[in-house]
Image (tube, rainbow, N blue to C red):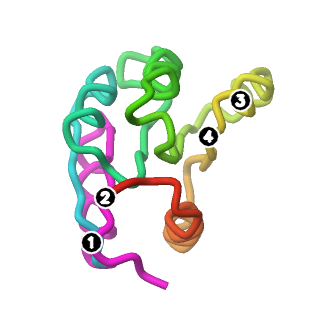
Amino acid sequence: MTHARARILVAEDDRDLRELLSELLGEEGYEVEMCERIIEAHEAARRARPDLVICNLTGSDGREHWEIVEALRRDPDIRHIPVILLTAATEVLEEREERVRALDVEVLPKPFEIDDLLDLVGRLLSRGRGTS
């Protein structure tokens, strides 16, 4: 089921992946907001009030951006928004499994299948946790 008009914030500093995600999600009927710098995802989410956030965990600088997800979860106005973390660093996630669980995020390892992404997006939007 497509959740047409649902708003998704994509926080990804890799331009090619950001544009690919925007195109794929747009073709599915979603309204896509893009954030070029992962570090700005919290403010972008406050401004856009998306129904879902897709965020790369590791920036192009190689730094993990846990603080962004933690800021989203601390903010009472947007803490309910589901978050999908994209990462190629699956070994890091295994070491931080408790943190992932505590932050209530979904993880999609890179590389990922497009159908897996779309299924996860649809499942999270079906939960009705986001706001429009």
Camera sees residue 66 = yes
Relative side of 58 to 105, left or right? left
Q: Is residue 121 magenta?
A: no
In terms of sequence position, does the residue under pointer 2 or pointer 1 come before the other? 1
- The residues bearing labels 3 and 1 have C-alpha atoms spaced at a distance of 32 Å
**Residue nearest the observer in this picture, 89 or 31:** 31
User: Which residue bears the numbered disc 4?
Assistant: 105
User: Which residue bears the numbered disc 2?
Assistant: 132
Q: From what the image shows, is residue 15 above or below residue 62?
A: below
Q: From what the image shows, is residue 54 above or below residue 65?
A: below
Circle 2/circle 1 CB separation < 8 Å: yes
In terms of sequence position, does the residue under pointer 2 or pointer 3 come before the other? 3
Camera sees residue 65 = no
Q: Which mark is residue 93?
A: 3
Circle 3/circle 1 CB separation < 8 Å: no
- The residues bearing labels 1 and 4 have C-alpha atoms spaced at a distance of 22 Å
User: Which residue bears the numbered disc 1?
Assistant: 5
